[in-house]
Image (cartoon, coloured by chain):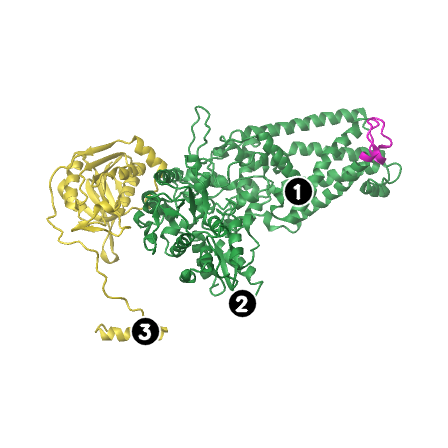
Chain colours: A green, B yellow
Amino acid sequence: MLSSIEKVVFVIVALIALGVSFHGFWMIVFTVRQGRPAPELKNIPGSLLRAAWRVLLQQTIFRARPALSAVHLALFFGLITYAFVNLFDVLEGFVAGFDLTYGGRHMTAIFLPSGVVNAFNLISDLMSGALLVAIVVFLVRRFGVRDRRLQFREQVLLHPKVRAGAQHTDSLIVGVFVIMHVTAHLLTQAFRLTEGPDPFMPLASLLNAWLGPSEVGMHVAWWVSLGWVLFILAYIPPSKHTHFFLAPINLGLAKQTPRGQLDPAIPLKVIQGQTFEPGAKHIYDLAWTRLLDAYACVQCNRCQDVCPAHAYGRPLSPAALEVNKRYLLKDATFGGRLQVLQQPLTETAISPEAVWSCTTCYACVRVCPVGNEPMADIVDIRRRLIVDGAPLDSGVQSALQSLATNGNWMGKSKRLRGRWAKEMDFPIKNALEEPVEYLWFVGDTASFDERVIPNTKMTARVFYQAGLDFGILYQHESNAGNDVRRVGEEGLFEQLVERNLQVFGQAQFQRIVTTDPHSLNTLKNEYPQFGGAFEVKHYTAVLVKLFEEGRLKVKKPLDHYKVTFHDPCYLGRYNGGFAAPRRLLNLLGVEFHEMPRNCENSFCCGAGGGQIWMSKVAPGERPAENRIREALSTLEKFPNGKKQLFIVTCPKDMIMYSDAVKTTGSEGRIEVRDLIQLVAEAIGIEEAQVVAIAA
Amino acid sequence: MNIVVVLKHIPSVADELPVRGNQVDFDSVDFVLNEWDEQSLEQAALIKEALGGTVTAIGVDVIGELDNLLHLALAKGADRAVKIAADDAGADSHRQAKWLSEAIRPMAPDLVLVGVQASNDIDGQLGPLLAAYLDLPYIGVVSSIEVQDGTALMNKEFAGGFGARYSVRLPFVAGVQVAPKPPRYAPVSKIRQIAQTAKIEVLEPSGEADSGLVFRKVAPPVVSGHAEMIEGSPKEIAARLVALLKERGLA
């Protein structure tokens, strides 16, 4: 089809475009390699293949925004189809006698069965339509209805180019590309139809009926269609649309360690001669896999949607962090502005206030379709701020100081840790003095907080009644360090781990049980790295077992309660403990209703990652208040006069939500109870109802 | 600038103080850094940052665990750590002041900072006694010390909400009430690193002094009497208050 001159021109332009594109990607590889060593990735080909499969199924994207995800699916398969479409367009241009119209009837160059050709023609024709619809939906969403989810709040730190709308320009360019490219391709095919409509090319035939065949038109449309492809190839590396190629790769190189295990503050594998400060001050202090995150991100802001700090009105947007990283790297790679890399991340990527508002709930990482870990970056930034002696919230500072001296964050004496146990009317074993099956790791809140101690005692009573062989460490237990690590105090975390492991070594037990999901998380996922691998169970799982073995029996079903259940981040999203609490609720016979945000998509109470220590309370609707309103609207859809309960399985939740019930003025409408209170009531422990938190 | 900061290791008030005989049972109580000493340490670090010089942290090691505090002081900016190995948990301010003065005199300090008081004796005497032994002036209840050309400017607090600004020529002893900034946080990794490498100078207590006071009996305060909670509408509460005040002859 093409003349010899056209062919020469195309080859030259194509070589230039591919050269520019290749150089761009090579620069990205070079930039990403500047990052720190990442935790070792195992079986990379295998995980890349798995990622490819998940991308093909569009699995990860359907975790949120189902309607828009369907549009993305159309766009994705449209562009995949177009990879072949473009290949065949080039063949049609370059190979005389290569003609796919009419089932390849006029094909003289390469023989393809007409069934295959017709199928391909139909798919590509329909996909052209799908692509046009999808891109128009996306453009209307961004520029027409201006979906607020694509925007950032005023107080969020943004790279000046992002603030000026560079992302939108990127989107517009790609939007125009898709429309022009697809339309031009359809026109090429339409002008090619010299013998009337082809039933396997309905859209092209429609255009053909209107415009008729045209040799000149065909050449012009071909050049527009393929010219755009060459332009876009060269344009992609510095744009946010590296997403097309790097998202699947990033997904394949995503975190392989358990969700509940933070990367070390200093890379474990250090190339000889290299020394590292803990955590991250500059962008190249981040692991290379987390630099790649920024290139995989297409800036959809799903992480911002699910972020409790963002919902609370704090200046944190995990999306903005990734976007800022992207623009910083772009400044360095394509803008030659290397000096921006010498500025601290807290000035260029995320404000200190945003760094300190993260609850480490993992919702952002969980929801990200491309496997990004903005939360891990935040923890790394905190680590360096602590080491560098940056100003700390006074509440966090006194919590840390108390943890260092007393082993608990409440400023209480070690000796008071086991006081609740001494007040029971049955003896509680000291696991350091006699062997026990279950070592109960009680945790700070359950040991010291007057509001939670009644539940701790109730748990002990239920365990005792079931004949569970358990003991505690009394004053020898120290805070497990989960939140200490997440607030960035790695040294103190290590010290706490050492103290606990030393005590564990002196005790005789088979497994650990805890009511505290935060302790559970670090004991289970992080202690093994320090030489302490134990079986760690949440009390809800132990209770299920006790019921199944008949050691606990429901004496009076609790059908007078209508309840909803809050998944604690560190039990649910981090450790998959969704089933046990629900199984218990089912066994107890309560009327149970699920909140819209449940299980993996549960909404953080706002206490994690050290937030509970903060002395300053920001204005706005706190996450716990937001959650109580969600619970009320869930339960009040079923008016039946039953008592409405908000069930928790985490000591911190007891405090956060009891407080939120009061601050939202919801007393009398809903009551917060620990699951153990329901269990105790159902198995016939008398004082079970009495221990609700006193107002 | 040659600054000496005195650290006092005292029983923690987070504990309920156990009593044995006529003294606190020092074996079953945690010892912590006196909270006012955190302020004087921060003040010393700030002066050093502004003017240069050295900060020496010194304390009487009353239970053999002062090293932890000295490591903390080094992590927060002290350059030198000295302990007086006394092993005398009940050593009062008089005895400690004597020992400290003997140790500090050869250091020829420009400035000696102590916490204005400590929550064990609560007599605020360590500073004045130390100054007397060293034959230096003393000024207490001060905040925001700034040093310029051999003179220090500072605020001093008086009862009744009054304050004054003082200018004192170096050297002298100051009892610090509060530093201009909240005490900094020392990351544990840094403290641990220092603990492995730091050299702590050990001195023997020298000199004798005594307050002359003898404990006759130590006991927790006896709870007596109860608060009466007045309930009712604001009017009723006000009427009851007036009646009570009249009844007791206060109005």
Q: Amino acid at mark 3?
A: Ala
Please give left or right for residue A182 compared with residue A429 in the image. right
Task: State the CA–CA distance, disc 3 to disc 1.
Answer: 71 Å
Of badges 1 and 2, nearer the viewer stands 2
Residue that extends furthest to the front in the rendered view of this protein: A550
Mark 1 vs mark 2, CA separation in Å: 54 Å
Q: Secondary structure at mark 2?
A: loop
Residue A674 in percent (x, y) is at 45, 56
Which numbered circle lies on residue B238? Answer: 3
Mark 2 or 3, closer to the camera: 2
Q: Is residue A108 magenta?
A: yes
Q: Is residue B193 above or below residue B229?
A: above
Give the residue pinned by disc 2. Answer: A641
The residues colored magenta run: A96-116
**Residue A24: mark in rendering:** none
Q: Amino acid at mark 1?
A: Leu
Q: Chain of mark 3?
A: B
**Residue A624 shown in magenta:** no
Residue B148, position as x, y percentages in the image: 26, 40
Residue beneath disc 1: A172
For the residue pair A566 and A356, the one nearer the viewer reads as: A566
